[in-house]
Amino acid sequence: MLAGRLFVRSIVSRACLATMGIRSKPQAHASQVILPSTPATTAVAIQCEESTSNRRFFSSQIETESTLDGATYERVCSDTLDALCDYFEELTENASELQGTDVAYSDGVLTVNLGGQHGTYVINRQTPNKQIWLSSPTSGPKRYDFVGTVAAGRWIYKHSGQSLHELLQQEIPGILKSESVDFLRLPYCS
């Protein structure tokens, strides 16, 4: 029974590799028998081919190349964090439903405390990686790379393709229900 399952797995593996254009060299084991392609193998290959169409894409497959030099990164990052700080201060000052809010920006770290019920957002620069890191009480940690040109670029999370400003636009209106929120008007969100 075990030998039968292992044999079927090897056929499925070879069929899947073949549909992806990968050829594997057969192993020369005394107990291994290599059979020619059969209708069952073809059906397995078709089934495998269909399942690869729903595969997950990884960060290396998303076009997100940053070409910023160090000085440009510093300027773009500072402009982004300054604009976010100013906007969060404006939002929290006008939010009557939030108690105990605090916005602080120092040494490249923006901390936005939205009170005990909603948690704290931390957005900071990561100069060695040329990234902005976000820690969200709602969605967790994320690392954003700058993609595009200085004139028309944005901070992108490579694993999902979502921008920093889009994520904030998605999460913050749920917290600040009485305010109109528009992070997409800030710099570097195009």
Image: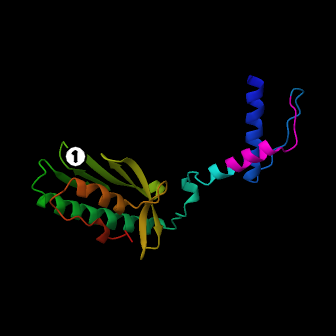
Q: Position of residue 19 (x, y in %)?
A: 74, 52
Q: Quadrant of the N terminus?
A: top right
Q: Is residue 136 left or right of residue 29?
A: left
Q: Identify the residue at image location x=37%, y=69%.
A: 188
Rendered residue at 71%/50% (across/down): 46
Furthest residue in direction top, as rendered? 1
Q: Is any atom of residue 107 visible in this view?
A: no
Q: Nearer the viewer, residue 102 or 96?
A: 96
Question: Which residue of the protein is positioned furthest toward the bottom in this rendering?
Answer: 151
- Amino acid on which the number 1 mark rests in the picture: His
In the rendered view, tell whether residue 66 sits above or below residue 35: below
**Residue 108, image x, y percentages:** 32, 56
Tell me residue 10's x, y (percent): 76, 36
Does residue 66 show up? yes
| Camera-nearest residue between 47 and 176 | 47
Residue 93 image point, x, y percent? 12, 59
Please name the residue that numbered disc 1 is placed on.
118
Task: In this rendered view, identify the residue nearer to me: 186 or 42.
Answer: 42
Q: Quadrant of residue 91?
A: bottom left
Position of 151 with respect to 118 (left or right) is right
Mark 1: which secondary structure? Answer: loop
Quadrant of the image containing the C terminus = bottom left
Residue 67 belongs to the span the image colors magenta: no
Q: What residue is drawn where x is 22% and y is 60%?
A: 88
Residues rendered magenta in the picture: 32-48
